[in-house]
Amino acid sequence: MSKRKDLKTANRYAQIIERIFLNHYTEGASEICFERKEIERVAQELHINLPKNLGDIVHSFRYQVTLPETIRSKATEGRQWIIRPAGRSRYCFVLVVEQDIAPTSMKAETKVPDATPGLVAMYSLDDEQALLAKLRYNRLIDIFTGITCYSLQNHLRTFLAGIGQVETDEIYVGVDQKGRHYVFPIQAKGHSDRLSVVQIEQDFALCVSKFPDLICRPIGAQFMGKNLIALFEFESTPEGVRWTEEEHYRLVSPDEVTPEVLRSYRERLPNT
DNA sequence: CTGAAAACACCCGACTTGGT
DNA sequence: ACCAAGTCGGGTGTTTTCAG
């Protein structure tokens, strides 16, 4: 993302993705598909070294960095390009309603007495794992959804027809007081990565394929600070995935928990 | 057709590099 | 020297290949 010498030093990833896009783009297009093989071809045309990890090109534009300006400028007002998987080694740029899944700044916080075991907090290896552990030990998914639920497994990776390989950070299953069963796929992000609608779409698809009988409610989780966590819930509409709920939870150490915090916490916790 | 092995695809963390 | 962006290697699940 250099500012001065974009033309000369735009990185290989950006050059490649830009060329692929422009190869297929026509005025007014809202879907542009390409295959992995094209990455190799384009690198050759541009006389640049083929990156060794081709998948990382798509991956980085999906979750980490913004697309080159050339591509972004071809999105109509209020819309943005995302890169959707479209089966094995196939990808599609799709123009969707712009949606930045980021925590709202001025949102009220709910205090929760931090029940994360000290040892776990101390030795978490990375942000994402730390976040998942805090969600689990503090039953934040129960509190957020109002449903009693349990972690089924984490890092469920599987292959979906028509999409490709997908991965969900953690899966919870739950049951409400009327006996309905739910599945909650969780996407967790530390400070640096962004939540992406692409992943939420995949979570819905994963539910349909692997848990067709359960009610599917994808959740996004993001650290806003060390002990401040934002949770999001999504719904699937004809216009695409939309974010419907957002709550912020602050984990506070047990010795600063007032009776009031404790009471409100107990009220929010679903009965088991 | 079946099962095992090889190849492929993808994501993550860690290393490398280039700009300040 | 420090920081962040760019790149790469490892691990694991899926798909393909192929011998029997």
Image (cartoon, coloured by chain):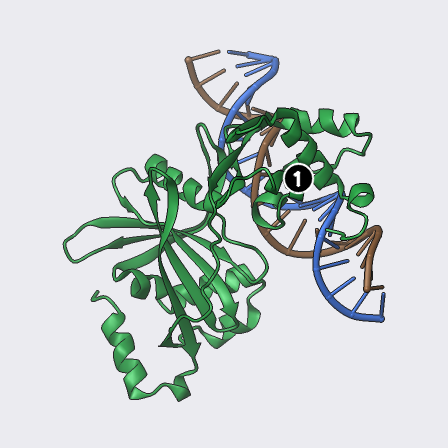
Chain colours: A green, B brown, C blue
- Left or right of A129: which side holds A272? left
- Left or right of B4: which side holds A8? right
Note whether residue A106 is visible: yes
Q: Where residue A177 sits: x, y (%)? A: 16, 58
Look at the picture and state if A249 lies above or below A8.
below
Look at the picture and state if A83 lies above or below B14.
above
Secondary-structure class at tag 1: helix
Residue sitting nearer the eye, A22 or A56: A22
Q: Where residue A97 sits: x, y (%)? A: 45, 43
Q: Measuring 50% from the left and 28% from the top, which residue is drawn there?
A: A87
**Residue at label 1?**
A70
Q: Where residue A13 sits: x, y (%)? A: 71, 40
Q: Where residue A208 sits: x, y (%)? A: 33, 37
Q: Measuring 71% from the left and 34% from the top, which residue is drawn there?
A: A16
Note whether residue A157 is visible: no
Look at the picture and state if A79 lies above or below C3.
above
User: Which of the 4 image quadrants contains residue A54?
Assistant: top right
- Left or right of A230: which side holds A39? right
User: Which of the 4 image quadrants contains residue A248?
Assistant: bottom left
If the image is split into quadrants, where does the C terminus of chain A sit? bottom left
Q: Measuring 52% from the left and 60% from the top, which residue is drawn there?
A: A129
Q: Residues within 10 Å of mark 1 (few under 14, many from 20)?
A: few
User: Which of the 4 image quadrants contains residue A146?
Assistant: bottom left
Chain that bears disc 1: A
Q: Mark 1 belongs to which amino acid? A: Thr
Q: Measuring 62% from the left and 38% from the top, which residue is drawn there?
A: A71
